[in-house]
Amino acid sequence: MGNTILEVKNLKKYFKSPRGMVHAVDGVQFSIERGQTLGVVGESGCGKSTLGRCVLRLIEPTEGEVFFEGRDICKLKKREIKELRKEMQIIFQDPFSSLNPRKTVLEIISEPIVFNKLMPGASRAQIENRVLELMDTVGIAERLINAYPHELDGGRRQRIGIARALAMNPKFIVCDEPVSALDVSIQAQILNLLKKLQKEMGLTYMFITHDLSVVHYFSNDIIVMYLGQVVEKAPSDVLFKNPLHPYTRALLSSILVPKVGGNQDTIQLRGEVTSPIDPPDECRFAKRCDYRCETCEGSNPPLVEVEENHFVACHCVKPGENLLKKSGAVSAS
Amino acid sequence: MSRGQTETIVSRKEGHSATLASRKYKKKSAFLESWNRLRTNPGAMFGLIVIILMVLLMVYSFMFITEEDVMAINSANRFKPPSAAHPFGTDSMGRDLFMRTVYGTRYSLAVGFFSVAFGLVVGVFFGTLAGYFGGWVEEIIMRVSDVMASIPGMLLGMVIVAVLGPSFLNLLIAIGVSNISGFIRMSRASILSVKGSEFVEAARAIGMSEFRIAFSQVLPNSVSPLIVTATARIATSVLAAAGLSFIGFGVPVPLPEWGALISDGRNYLGRAPHLTLFPGIFIMLTTFACSLLGDGLRDALDPKLKQ
């Protein structure tokens, strides 16, 4: 326990909308150990980015607690939050809008240092050396120091975004789909870079993505989100070997396998996603689930530990028994 | 090439302190890029040249034309048509119209510049607040701005001048105030289009305050439409000033503001048309030039047209 860097308890974020409250994040719990990576997976609109921003308190959570190194950051005052920002940073999805188009690479990377006075008394040249050092760490050539973002390609921009986050010397970084806007070849480079940085600097990541193949490579633990809730939580290998929740299975079966005839038994999800606006008390996945029964429409299943460290929120999966296989057979016939 | 390399090696040895890397590699100036695009636009260049000529005329008038020159009455010389001695002819009191028109440049250019600058500063400040913070701040600012916009500029100017009394400074204030609401709307709209970007969130993540983000991160990214509006506004402001002076609400009578000159000359339209013609041409040229330049700037600053 002493090595837990981040612990989130019953975190909720509701947005007001004309038709009611949108339950973007609804009662999420997890914790991350120092130096590890937590993967957060889910389809678009399931609240994973909102979760990431709530954890950093870039948006105010509606309810719940976020403990960072033992302190509840939801109760911190403005000044204390400014201090906290040095510890927690974020890398954004879209490298084309995450960099200010009017600033040069030097200005973008040095901004956090200058603004937070991280190098008190340092001369311009010393700050610039630090920027060059950071550029070297993330693999950008020194000659690009005065370039504007629009002169660079997506991969380089994303590296600058990473350098900007590293400039604060953080311990914890939320990676909000850092590679989903990039070409596949560049994705691998950026992922390798993130891995290298983690090893060298002992960083802890919360890695948000919708791409399961990425998250397998990257994470120690994975949580699968559906409509603002965690439906399954397990160590990466366990989740990939033995997915229990029907939604996780569908997600896993959607990974493309480079093999002739390899993708034949894909599980196709049908039906529409339940509206996140004031959802009724039923399993949120029930409408698209092949295994649904009356219990599923009766109440929202809690997250239960089925095996060691493997949590599932499904009425059909309980410790020691798995009804899915049986009822799956029934629905198939 | 080899010299550049030795420099790098030397600076490495001294720990970068000798040559700053940022000095070694050139910045691609956004200003220069826009200027190169503006240069190829003949209309905009025409506008720019006319404006520069007007400014030169104003400088000339400050250096060589005194107030006595333009006020001196010479009853023997009334209503002379244009000639070598009096390029624009003389008016009903025998004063040289060329000198008066050139002397009047300062009023129009001052109105154009200062009233727009006033409207720009005040309008952009409130527009940025409204656009970035939203909520009740936006509601209040935008409703006040709507009220201001609903009163015709000319009428608003007349009311302000009527309350404060006719003087050049009051004319500036009157037109400046009528410029505010346009800038509020313009800056709010362009702030709205920028504030959702992720770099705003990145600034928040390094701990910047909202106020600082609004003015140091968001606002600089929405200046292009403001520059364009400002240039176009100069034209309408010059026109409004001439209009107010024409009906007697602007620069006090004997001073040669262009609108006042036309107003003076309209009584003698049949007898001495040059009295209205020359100041009229000056007003037209100035506003036309500003509009052309504004259009050119809009094209030059629009990043979507980048080739």
Image (cartoon, helix red, strand yellow):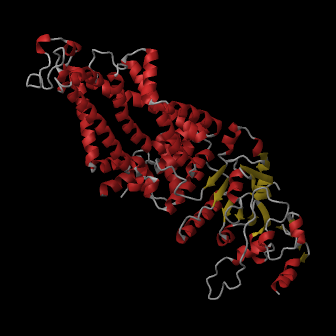
Q: Where residue A183 sits: x, y (%)?
A: 53, 69
Locate residue B61: give its quadrant: top left
Locate residue B270: give its quadrant: top left
Instruction: Using the image as rendered, state which of residue A252 and residue B273 is in the foreground.
Output: B273
Residue A272 visible in the current orientation: yes
Q: Is residue B127 above or below residue A67?
A: above
In the figure, is residue A60 to the left or right of A168?
Answer: right
The residue positioned farthest toward the right in the image shown: A320
The residue positioned farthest toward the front in the image shown: B270
**Image quadrant in which the C terminus of chain A is located:** bottom right
Q: Residue at x 42, y 19 (%)?
A: B161
The residue positioned farthest toward the left in the image shown: B84
Q: Is residue A114 above or below residue B104?
A: below
Q: Where residue B100 sits: x, y (%)?
A: 21, 21
Residue B103 visible in the current orientation: no
Locate residue A308: give its quadrant: bottom right
In the figure, is residue B237 to the left or right of A117?
Answer: left
Q: Where residue B5 sits: x, y (%)?
A: 35, 56
Instruction: Using the image as rendered, state which of residue B278 and residue B141 is in the foreground.
Output: B278
